[in-house]
Image (cartoon, rainbow, N blue to C red):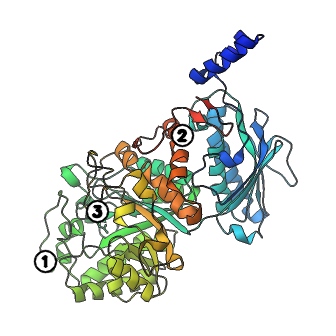
Amino acid sequence: MIPFNLNSAFRGTGWAVLHFSILMGVFSCTADPPTPKDLSKEHLIPKPVEVLATGSSFRLTEATGVYVQSPPAQADEVRQVGEYLAGKLRPATGFGLPVQNVDNAPPEGSIYLLLSEGDAELGEEGYELVITEELVKLSANAPAGLFRGLQTIRQLLPAAIEKSEVQPAPWEIATGTIRDYPSYAYRGAMLDVARHFFSVEDVKRFIEQIALYKLNVLHLHLTDDQGWRIEIKSWPKLTTHGGSTQVGGGQGGYFTQEDYAEIVRHAQDHYITIVPEIDMPGHTNAALASYPELNCDGKARELYTGIEVGFSTLCTDKEVTYQFVDDVVRELAALTPGPYFHIGGDESHVTEKDDYIFFINRVQDIVQTHGKQMVGWDEITLAELEEGSVAQFWANAEHAKAAVEQGVKVIMSPATKTYLDMQYDSTTTLGLHWAAYIEVDSAYIWDPATFVEGVSKDDILGIESPLWSETITNMDEIEYMVFPRLVGHAEIGWTPASERNWEEYKVRLGRHKARFEAMGIDYYPSALVPWAEAEVTSAGESSEQ
Ligand code: TNX
């Protein structure tokens, strides 16, 4: 739609100019967006480490190209990152945005992606973005840094950039310099595909959504009492029987190994590491229903479609159990390029404590034999953890402290702050509230480095937000519980604690409404957030895309 231009209709008299401004205030939707000029006032999430504004703007036009430069060994990968950026910008701009390699500085008006090692402060994922009237120059030590940086470029453009059809220009970015890198190396979300099954397409969409906020891990909770969701070729009934239902008795489903490989590839394209979880020795009813020999009494269990926890256990003193675990870990580890393998280990209420410890110790060896570092929920600190293993704190502070005493790193997932299945308040219809009601402010106002006494920043690998799916059945429901709380968690993982402040953050978050809507994301419109009805740019005026 071409915006009706009130300016030309009234041009010429002081009276008209005065009334024009009033009209523009009221009917702001008829105007072009004002030119963004103050980079320091842009509503970026996560908030960058350093921003220096220079008070002008860059304009993206039909003539803009994406130029990439890197050492030859990384040329293909950097070009792919350039293609990713161009692919994000083409639909709404309608511009061709060809991606080309260059050896020297590209022509004026370009976007320039440059890989050049040696900026130690930026690390693997950091980036520097220098925007002048002539050029948008993004540089990083590694392709992952370029990928994180291009998310910043997306957010600096008007929200309409996220729409899938051509929108009216102009496409402008405020000038200045951003230097940015994460506080924590591990910034994750977890999706429970066991209680309810979600399709490959849903998981891929989720990956795209979390990438925009610079997360770098997707933990997939692949098995639980209600369903086994990953094909294991040596134990086929796990999925054909154990994957055949879900909470409430629906048809369930599972990922073939090819499906899983497709998810892994999509995650890699977004510089996201997949952490697969096989929850054991508890949370295993689906396996116990599929293979009678995994039960101590040798009798298969019935499939389960309720939402109780803590009633199932593998038989920890049968040798076949360890053959089973070895096969599962071997097949899944071979499909998983990331360094971690999550073995669950939570809520094994019907496993004797000694048996539990024996089991975790043995499984840790199996995981290491297959080349991975073991991750488990905080209960695993009861066992003897080895270097490289990781404990995921969710509820028990003593367990988190025990991890530190054992010298292993902690992932912070406090249920009272990060559990995305917790209801926002007592009126929320989806979700549970056993840990807390978690409003958007509460999800944001906490610091991983001070949350558990005795667990400090150096002990923490990062943060992760789990979405358990007992009550979540489709993508819209996933989005409603995840957005906007996960956006705040993304900032906690990336932005230094000294730079975080709810009063300031909530204003920035409010400006992301237009982005959520442009992307078709279903979000919870919390009354605590000043949602901006129209996008407000750094020019300080209001306009609608
Ligand atoms: C606790 S957290 C669980 C899950 C449930 C969740 C529901 C954890 C390690 N175990 O099995 O799905 O609560 O909120």
Q: Disc 1 and disc 3: Cα gap in Å?
A: 36 Å
Name the kind of residue labelled 3 in the image: Ala
Residue 210, how many percent across, how many down? 50, 53
Which corner quadrant holds the N terminus?
A: top right
Q: Nearer the viewer, residue 495 or 238?
A: 495
Residue 262, how many percent across, how many down? 48, 55
In this rendering, the answer to whether 399 lies above or below 100 is below
Q: Earlier in the sequence, mark 1 or mark 3?
A: 1
Q: Quadrant of residue 93?
A: top right
Q: Disc 3 and disc 2: Cα gap in Å?
A: 30 Å
The tally of labels here is 3
Q: Quadrant of residue 421?
A: bottom left
Q: Is mark 3 within 8 Å of ligand 1?
A: yes
Q: Nearer the viewer, residue 46 or 408?
A: 46
Tell which tag, 3 or 2, sits nearer the viewer: 3
Q: Is residue 181 left or right of residue 70?
A: left
**Quarter holding ligand 1:** bottom left
Name the kind of residue labelled 1 in the image: Gly
Q: Residue at x 67, y 26 (%)?
A: 32
Q: Residue at x 70, y 66 (%)?
A: 122
